[in-house]
Image: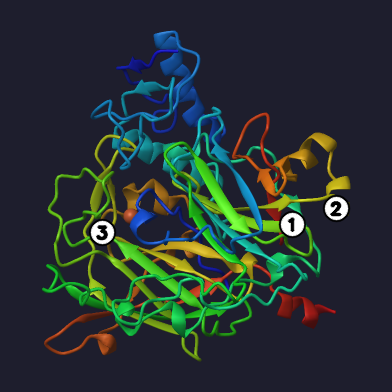
């Protein structure tokens, strides 16, 4: 079957898709943060990032409950703090910044899906927390765009450049 | 650098009358317009523009890009020519998704990568699996957008039904479908929506559900209104419902928009027309289904969704 085409997430997803604690896949582990930039080097204040990752043992089964709801009033009460759902969703702030709190993935990387106003079809990239053979297959200056910089123990910086000299490597899974 | 405002416009010298640029690649045409504006005003960079005010507006080209040069918007006729030129260049070519670089939608200019995507084929890739959702993630009320407040929303009550499939035609079961939309007057409850149309205290416009065992989803809502935006002068979005859909793999993620059949705004909208293949564009348009209409109650629409991208289950079959 032929697929349904993608369309931009637009500027008004903010009251629909983000949810409280969306960037807290798990507390007590690592923090990854950064900014999303456009081709002029300006921060993108209306991007939405989604994260999917393995658990610390490398398991990719995930778990339901990312959007767990209060059965009384329907509000989002968030993950139960026990199950590792593996999924996070974070809108960039007015300065293009985002923060993710999670556990170190057993396979060494966190998958990222980027949505934004002005982006007609989402983009995939990866946040590598340590060396990986895939990075060696890329020209060094390109491969570097996929590697998080450890700012201090357990805190990593990862900027996403949609375009330009520092353009992030985006992936095609075919 | 201080903000500079270009209060001028240029017409694109191509197309209809055998203009000087009729042989130029369509994706260069918008760049020509930008260059012409820059030459006239002596500026070296042009960003997004807000024609109606210098203040930020989410409707179109916000001014929050510091140091950006503002320009007067093109009229619809020029956007129409750009859309037609790109479509002519792609005549008959199969294209399932929009190009990320689509000049008639101005905000794409600085937000698409210029390097090709890097192919990654790895049967162990995390992206071949994906997030899962369950009964704790939705409530029964989420699928009825007309029941989220004390009173009834204004507008034409509709239901939207459909099924979610993968490219092999297999139903996607138990996965999350999220929607959001403007109210009947074309207004979003978002502080950056400054369209002077009324907000509806009885309508937020957010819905969620999980697909059933047949991949089916259903929402009750009201038909959203068309709304203006500032991509160009007199730009209006056709009525649409935003959809966010999860498949069995992260690679199958889809965010898109569902349109209503026969909307007279279709030819003018750069976002819909970014899908240059007519057959693919039709897949974004719901069908009116009289059997889904409920007597004395609501009009029914049907819209099936097919997710792209490989999944772990496919890889296993391929081995
Ligand atoms: Fe919209």
x 78%, y 65%: residue = A106
Identify the secondary structure beneath mark 1: strand
Confirm or deny contact between disc 1 and disc 2 (CB under 8 A). yes
- Residue A47 locus on image (x, y percent): 48, 47
- Residue A155 locus on image (x, y percent): 67, 46
Please state which of residues A153 and B210 is positioned toward the viewer in this rendering. A153
Is the residue B241 above or below the residue A158 in the image?
Answer: below
CB of residue at label 3: within 8 Å of ligand 1?
A: yes
Q: Which mark is residue B76?
A: none
Q: Which mark is residue A132?
A: 2
Tag 3 residue: B182
Q: Is residue B46 left or right of residue A41?
A: left
Judged from the image, the quadrant occupied by ligand 1 is: bottom left
- Residue B104 locus on image (x, y percent): 43, 39
* Residue B104 in sight here: no
From mark 1 to mark 2, how far is it between C-alphas? 9 Å
Mark sitting earlier along the chain (1/2): 1
* Residue A70 in sight here: yes
Tag 1 residue: A109
x 40%, y 13%: residue = B2
- Quarter of the C terminus of chain B within the rendering: bottom right
Q: Mark 2 Cα within 10 Å, few/some/many (few <14, many 20+)?
A: few
From mark 2 to mark 3, how far is it between C-alphas? 45 Å
């Amino acid at each position: 079957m032929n697929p349904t085409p993608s369309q931009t997430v637009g500027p008004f997803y903010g009251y629909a898709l983000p949810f409280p604690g969306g960037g807290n896949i798990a507390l007590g582990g690592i923090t990854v943060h950064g900014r999303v930039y456009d081709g002029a080097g300006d921060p993108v204040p209306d991007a939405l990032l989604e994260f999917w990752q393995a658990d610390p043992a490398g398991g990719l089964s995930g778990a339901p409950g990312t959007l767990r709801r209060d059965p009384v009033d329907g509000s989002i009460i968030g993950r139960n703090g026990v199950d590792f759902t593996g999924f996070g969703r974070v809108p960039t702030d007015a300065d293009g910044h985002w923060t993710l709190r999670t556990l170190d993935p057993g396979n060494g990387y966190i998958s990222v899906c980027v949505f934004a106003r002005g982006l007609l079809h989402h983009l995939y990239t990866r946040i590598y927390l340590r060396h990986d053979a895939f990075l060696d297959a890329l020209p060094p200056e390109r491969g570097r765009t996929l590697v998080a910089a450890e700012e201090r123990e357990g805190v990593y910086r990862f900027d996403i450049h949609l375009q330009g000299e520092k353009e992030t490597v985006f992936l095609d899974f075919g | 650098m201080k903000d500079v405002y270009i209060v001028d416009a240029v017409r694109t010298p191509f197309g209809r009358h055998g203009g000087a640029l009729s042989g130029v690649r369509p994706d260069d045409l918008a760049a020509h317009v930008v260059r012409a504006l820059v030459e006239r005003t002596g500026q070296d960079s042009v960003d997004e523009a807000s024609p109606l005010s210098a203040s930020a507006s989410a409707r179109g080209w916000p001014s929050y890009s510091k140091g950006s040069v503002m320009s007067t918007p093109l009229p619809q006729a020029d956007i129409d020519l750009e859309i037609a030129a790109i479509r002519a260049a792609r005549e008959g070519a199969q294209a399932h998704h929009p190009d990320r670089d689509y000049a008639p939608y101005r905000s794409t200019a600085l937000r698409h990568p210029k390097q090709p995507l890097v192919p990654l084929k790895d049967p162990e890739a995390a992206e071949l699996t994906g997030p899962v959702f369950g009964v704790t993630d939705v409530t029964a009320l989420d699928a009825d957008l007309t029941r989220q407040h004390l009173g009834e929303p204004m507008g034409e009550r509709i239901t939207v039904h459909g099924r979610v499939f993968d490219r092999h035609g297999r139903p996607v079961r138990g996965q999350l479908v999220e929607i959001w939309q403007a109210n009947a007057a074309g207004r979003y409850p978002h502080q950056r929506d400054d369209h002077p149309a009324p907000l509806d205290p009885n309508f937020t416009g957010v819905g969620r559900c999980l697909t059933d065992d047949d991949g089916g989803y259903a929402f009750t809502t009201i038909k959203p209104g068309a709304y203006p935006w500032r991509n160009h002068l007199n730009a209006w979005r056709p009525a649409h419902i935003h959809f966010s859909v999860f498949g069995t793999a992260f690679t199958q993620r889809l965010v898109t928009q569902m349109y209503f059949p026969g909307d007279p705004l279709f030819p003018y909208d750069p976002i819909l027309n970014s899908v240059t293949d007519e057959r693919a564009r039709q897949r974004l348009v719901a069908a009116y289904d009289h059997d889904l209409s409920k007597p004395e109650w609501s009009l029914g629409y049907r819209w099936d969704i097919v997710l792209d991208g490989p999944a772990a289950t496919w890889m296993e079959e391929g081995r």
